[in-house]
Image: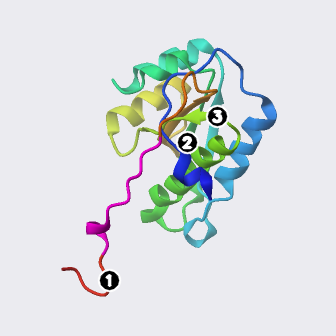
């Protein structure tokens, strides 16, 4: 799958709106992710309003790209949907990665901005959206058309591969 090897973090975007059908495909890809016991604890907030994107950019020093992005998707855990309490971060990680891979397929770029498990970041997002207690912020992903050509890296490191035993 070429998208795995051509994905790179994109933080600068063209001033071009992302089409609604592409947003829907990103969300469909997210919801196609594997999930512990098929619990599917995800919820998503699609953000296109500049004012909200600017507010979200204050969540961490690494989130400044949100202020210039045409779109962000906030990935949330719905605690009411949890059957297996210890696996929600794995479920949402798979959903987030699926969105990033679909973005490459759609000729979009994005970057994974980690929110959980840092309480201050989770609280910040909760306050921006006035979230109920059962929703917990996991990540924010700004998306858009890349301003520059993404430069993927080959991260394969043979010394980290072990067969049968760790040597």
Q: Which residue is mark 1?
A: 163
Q: Residue at x 53, y 45 (%)?
A: 7
Residue 45 sits in quarter: top right
Looking at the rendered structure, the secondary structure element under dot 2 is strand
Which is closer to the viewer, label 2 or label 3?
3
Q: CA distance from mark 1 to mark 3?
A: 37 Å
- Which percent across, then down, holds residue 76? 54, 43
Answer yes or no: is residue 15 visible: yes
Q: Residue at x 71, y 20 (%)?
A: 17
Magenta-tinted stretch? 152-161
**Label 3 crowd bin: few (<14), some (14–19), many (20+), radius 10 Å:** many
The residue furthest right is: 21
Most foreground residue, 44 or 147: 147
Q: Which residue is mark 3?
A: 108
Looking at the rendered structure, the secondary structure element under dot 3 is loop
Most foreground residue, 7 or 18: 7
Q: Residue at x 51, y 15 (%)?
A: 54
Looking at the rendered structure, the secondary structure element under dot 1 is loop
Q: Quick check: 48 above or below 132?
A: above
Looking at the image, residue 51 sits to the left or right of residue 116; the answer is: right
Taking the magenta stretch, the answer to whether it contains residue 78 is no
């Amino acid at each position: 799958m070429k998208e795995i090897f051509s994905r790179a973090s994109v933080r600068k975007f063209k001033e071009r709106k992302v089409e609604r059908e592409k947003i829907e495909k990103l969300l469909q890809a997210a919801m196609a992710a594997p999930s512990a016991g098929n619990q599917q604890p995800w919820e998503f907030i699609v953000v296109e309003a500049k004012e909200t994107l600017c507010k979200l950019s204050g969540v961490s020093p690494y989130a400044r790209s949100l202020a210039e992005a045409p779109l962000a998707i906030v990935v949330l855990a719905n605690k009411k949907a949890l059957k297996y309490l210890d696996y929600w971060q794995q479920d949402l990680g798979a959903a987030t990665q699926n969105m990033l891979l679909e973005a490459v397929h759609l000729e979009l770029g994005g970057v994974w901005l980690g929110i959980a498990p840092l309480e201050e970041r989770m609280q910040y997002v909760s306050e921006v959206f006035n979230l109920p207690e059962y929703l917990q912020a996991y990540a924010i992903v700004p998306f858009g058309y890349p301003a520059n050509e993404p430069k993927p890296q080959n991260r394969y490191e043979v010394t980290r591969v072990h067969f049968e035993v760790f040597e």
